[in-house]
Image (cartoon, helix red, strand yellow):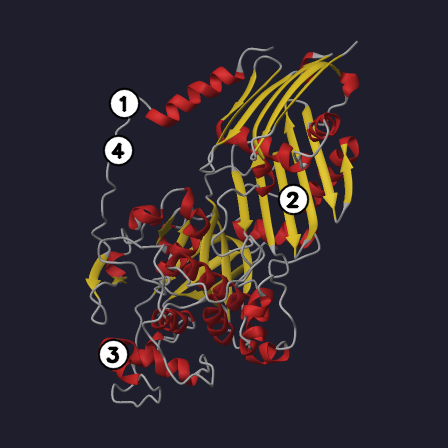
Amino acid sequence: MKRSAKMMMALMSVTLVFGAVGSTAFAAPTSNAINKSVATHNKNLIEIDIGHEDLEDLYFKIKERYPDVTGQDWNWAYDSIGNMTIRDVFDGFVEDHFRPHESVTRIESIVTAVRLMGLESAAKAKAANATLHFKDANKLESNYAWAKGYVLVALERGLFDPNETELAPHQPATRVWVSSLLVRALGLQQQALQQMTTIPNFKDKDSIPAGAVGYVNVAVQSGILVNLTDGSFQPQKPVTRAELAVLLDRTNDCINDKDSIRIAAKFKQFSTTSPNASTPVDSQQRPLDSTLRVENVNGQTVSYAVSSKLPVRDQLQYVPLHHLKDGDWVSLVIRRNNVEDVSIINRSDKPIATEIKNFSVNIRQGNDTILQTHYFKRDGYTSAYVNQRGTIQTGDQAKNWHEQWLNNLALRSNFTKQQLIDNVLRAAGTSEHQATSYTITVDFADGTQLEAVKHPTNHPNPNPHPSSHVVQELDIEIEGRKEKHDIDAVYERSNNGTAEAYIERDDDDEVKGQEAVRTIERWLSSAQLNDSMTKTQIADRLLNALNLKRDQLEAYAIDVRFTNGKTISIDWERD
């Protein structure tokens, strides 16, 4: 049984350092269907001209579109950057980069907010000779004349603080300023004014301007903006382009929640006609020139108006509507009987899995843990743990709880991320806006994985299992009285946040790569180890996380190294 998992880890490390032998990298081709024209308002910005004649090859993969947002560092912003780009809310640059790390200016934030509200046409229609009463209006006229219409619309819609006398278009947009801007874009000024005397729950609350306190409270309650990992708000911290994309995307979710419904349905048919001057438009000013027919969950066929230019999210890319096939499951956002958003849940020719082998949930609301669960099932072996608002269950009790809960959830491999979030949070007795943070991971038996993460920061730690940060290395060797209880596992997390792991059970059952990392991090999250624990406490907690008892074992050896360098070694053998 003590075949060395460490040797396997060493081989994995060599592969990670030197790369796979014989691999060759190729640059992704640029689609000719994307017409990149330099916008007249700024020589650096690009606009995507979505012409009907280009629909066949138009839509893009985000990683090919913006090579500088690939990799784990930007996973937290990846979806939002894509969503805001395809909706023409946020642009990239002429060299096909997004520059996610750069700070955004106040004028850029205003422009994107107006676009998100669907008011770009109104902004472009404004008279160029209109007068602005900001003291520094000349700066806008000389450097940002293209944005004048957006500022006028923002003024008309009440997006500015009435006491602001200067626009300061070139200044970096701060967290507190963007919070106020987006709360106003949602029309929640009255709610903000009602919460001006409510003290925010941040350790640096005294640094938040008094006139912005209500807006910060509403921004947090709405799920737009949250505190940083150290519990601070840092109101004057500049917002980066990646962060603004996430904030805009969250604001868009709030808009959808207010006056839209989200449904899952089976696609049946798509038909289009030529638009004319009287054709109505959707919230993004796209002509509603088409009809989408779907079959709802009750088996009824219903029709909705839709724009033929509406992009459809298909995993990591966007495709045109006519790429949908009869029987495809789709998620729709419906507003006033018009389709505002479409994403593919499951293709008609792809089987849908329901059997779950891994399930992990960690939901926090403020400083409280609402629900923390871990469930692992493989080849007859099951490990389970539940912490429900401080009530902890382990062993068979936790296993039975999970099986009943999962049966009620009825999760399927064709769920969208939003369906996963909605179902799990609703079952946990909370909502996306109420939850400060959550991590939800589901592994199905067919290999499909669903994951949803909400971090307690706009620039979250890329590691979705913060509790495992305490442990940097873990080596477990367990010899069971029955062979099915034999376990050999190794876990190492480097200083840059990447992790490697290997698990062997029953001498011939191996788990490697990210599946092994996720499994061991669930054990660690369940065990909640720290360097002040006794050896017995550490062993007991790890055995509980593994759903094992000492009377099932002949011997075990455990080595734990914490991030502060302290190492604890435990050896136990039955007398």
Cα–Cα span, label 4 and label 3: 43 Å
Question: How many labels, in total?
Answer: 4
- Label 3: state its secondary structure: helix
Q: Earlier in the sequence, mark 2 or mark 1?
A: 1
Q: Is residue 391 left or right of residue 250?
A: right
Q: Which residue is mark 3?
A: 145
Q: Which residue is mark 4?
A: 25
Q: CB under 8 Å between callouts 3 and 1?
A: no
Q: Is residue 55 left or right of residue 507?
A: left
Q: Mark 2 vs mark 3: give the one in front.
A: 3
Q: Which residue is mark 2?
A: 410
Give 295 or 19, whichever is nearer the viewer. Answer: 19
- Label 2: state its secondary structure: loop
Q: CB under 8 Å between callouts 1 and 4?
A: no
Q: Mark 2 vs mark 1: give the one in front.
A: 1
Residue type pointed to by label 1: Gly
Q: Which residue is mark 1?
A: 22
Cα–Cα span, label 4 and label 2: 41 Å
Image quarter (top left, top right, bottom left or bottom right) of the C terminus: top right
Give the image location of residue 451, x and y in percent.
Answer: 54, 44
Cα–Cα span, label 1 and label 4: 10 Å
- Label 4: state its secondary structure: loop
Cα–Cα span, label 2 and label 3: 54 Å
Give the image location of residue 252, x and y in percent.
Answer: 48, 65
Residue type pointed to by label 3: Ala
